[in-house]
Image (cartoon, rainbow, N blue to C red):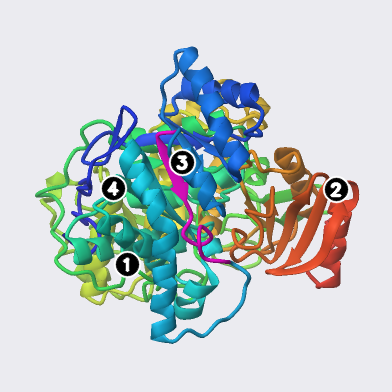
Amino acid sequence: MQLYTPSLTEYKRLPTREVRIGDLLLGNFNPIRVQTMTTTDTMDTMGTVEQSIRCIEAGAELVRITAPSKKEAENLLNIKNELRKRGYHTPLVADIHFTPNAAEIAARIVEKVRVNPGNYVDKKKFEQIEYTDVEYLEEIDRIREKFTPLVRICKEHGTAMRIGTNHGSLSDRIMSRYGDTAIGMVESAMEFLRIARAESFHQIVLSMKSSNPQVMVQAYRLLVKQMMEEFNEAYPLHLGVTEAGDGEDGRIKSAAGIGTLLEDGIGDTVRVSLTEDPEFEIPVCRDLVKRYSFPVKSNAGKVPAIDQLPYSPFEYQRRTTYAVQNIGDKQVPVVVADLSHIEKITPQHLQSIGYHYDEVTDKWSIGDMAADYVFTGNQLLDFELPGTLRVIVFPEAWKSSKQSASGEQKYFPLFMNSGFAEAETKDASLNFVMVDCFSDTTSVNDYSYLESLANDPSVVICLSSKNSNAMQSVRAMMVAFIQQKISNPALLMTDSHWTTSDEHLIHYATECGALLLDGMGDGLWLSMNQKAIQSFSNPDNQLSGRIYAQTSVASPESFLNQTAFGILQATRTRISKTEYISCPSCGRTLFDLQETTAKIRSVTNHLKGVKIAIMGCIVNGPGEMADADFGYVGSGVGKITLYKGKEIVKRNIDSEIAVQELIQLLKDNDAWVEPAVVN
């Protein structure tokens, strides 16, 4: 096995133990299962039953229900009995945080329990405690004493268990020894797994969730590596990006994290944590999983094997490149907007990619998510361009281009494969060269032409692949570049043949996100085939979700541009907007999370780079917020507590004024700017 995956160049599932959850089999090459979590009060039996049914009918194969105390755990029996009476036999999962006795009750009722090792026995008080080795082992013994009864109950009743580590709720003990790291997340889960194995209990699923896809991916990879080294086997993995948010952002962030791991064959069940009604999570899960639910064509024989990675997959380090104008080196990744499908491009078309032209003043205004380059194919534009925008065209059109009225060069050529090496005329400062990664069989993978452009100070390489395993193919080319010390900046070119907006988001975020999270890529160039472009005129082409189901999707150009910036934001490689870390709501939530999230977004979405956490209750409070700058947390019915980082600033504010208090907190900490006035 290559460090953490069966193959780095083709799709192969990671072999895992088989776990039975009721009548459902998980792991061991069974289909990747999809699941969600109810948002109702667990004591509302009929409300929870009705919502569970909606989730099941949407396709959920497991339904998780919160059980924060004994009374909720006991009521799981009423919920289960009512579902079974109505003919629904989907396995139920009890979600446990702080209460071992609730877990022990639930384990006798439902098919699976989830425990969080960060707060099941350990405590989270944000205290730095120094442990000697002896004291640390004594704490492990204390955990064994508290955790073993649950293991034995699960073993007796045939109940499965998920050991679910969350980045934001690592215990003070783990934090004191390992810090806020992926390694700490892995060790937190491994402590519990070792105790279960000592009891010969193996009906276990594990998860390593974080709101930061970088941390999440690294933790899962490290967990696989640790299990294989220690046990020579792996347990099934539940994948999820916690507190992903809503809308496009939630889908992109989830796909970047979950999709990266699925591409490497890691993952046996997925849950997409959206701040939307739980049944709307299921279509997104299914879009993620269906990419792997039919025979995936193999890259074997087409893509050279990777025997050793020249970088660490367990920590982020951007590939070393030099700068070609504003691309590469330490500059933020660029975005290329593909307008080549538009017959006659006008200034109005540029509005969809972040540029607004005012005819009265004859000036352009540029948004935070304005594309850096535009590809027009063979079309030269007959109007003066915004100062920062440059145009990529095919070589013949480039030869016909002229400097702008201000004397700037605005047009640069795109050569195909060996075209650059064969061209008599090239640009002195910037040339784009498109390289097909191992899918062009006519070339028999002859890349000798790369010698002519390798480390040419004017060349930016654009990587794409038509292989089913396109991400792995591009990664293999990037690995070859690193090994051969080819340091040209590289853009990731990804086409989509899917139909719906959800499908496109999943596709782009999976294929581009996986590479960006490994430090590969100095820019994104997203495009669609003609059929996909035409689908945008279809009224059914909408984002799934309670809020977004009534919202028409924008033009293809706008959609692609926003998606590119969303992927860069989700992978933490280019921050262009406010980031919201928003929990998906559950039975513990103390206010209308969806409505409040939308309200906070509406007044803060202009605060570029600020991370705001919106949490439904104290369970998902300061811990789950992870690296948020500010937090808005439910602390009682109609009451909100505000945080700066992990420090409480104001307690139990009336929810009617809490959003204004949040704005004041932002102002007090110099994080507020007044929104621009749009005339």
Q: Is residue 181 above or below residue 600?
A: below
Residue of label 4: 470
* Residues packed near mark 3 inside 10 Å, few (<14), some (14 to 19) or many (20 plus): many
Q: Position of residue 259 (x, y in %)?
A: 39, 47
**116 in magenta:** yes
Q: Residue furthest top?
A: 86
Label located before the other in sequence (4 or 2): 4
Q: Amino acid at mark 3?
A: Arg
Label located before the other in sequence (2 or 1): 1
> Closer to us: mark 1 or mark 3?
3
Q: Amino acid at mark 2?
A: Ser
Disc sitting over residue 655 in the figure: 2
Mark 1 → mark 3, Cα distance in angstroms: 23 Å
Q: Amino acid at mark 4?
A: Ala
Q: Which element type, helix, strand or loop, lies under badge 4?
A: helix
Q: Position of residue 326 (x, y in %)?
A: 51, 70
Q: Is residue 510 above or below residue 517?
A: above
Disc sitting over residue 313 in the figure: 1
Q: Amino acid at mark 1?
A: Pro
Observer able to see residue 438: yes
Label located before the other in sequence (4 or 1): 1
Q: Are marks 4 and 1 in contact (CB under 8 Å)?
A: no
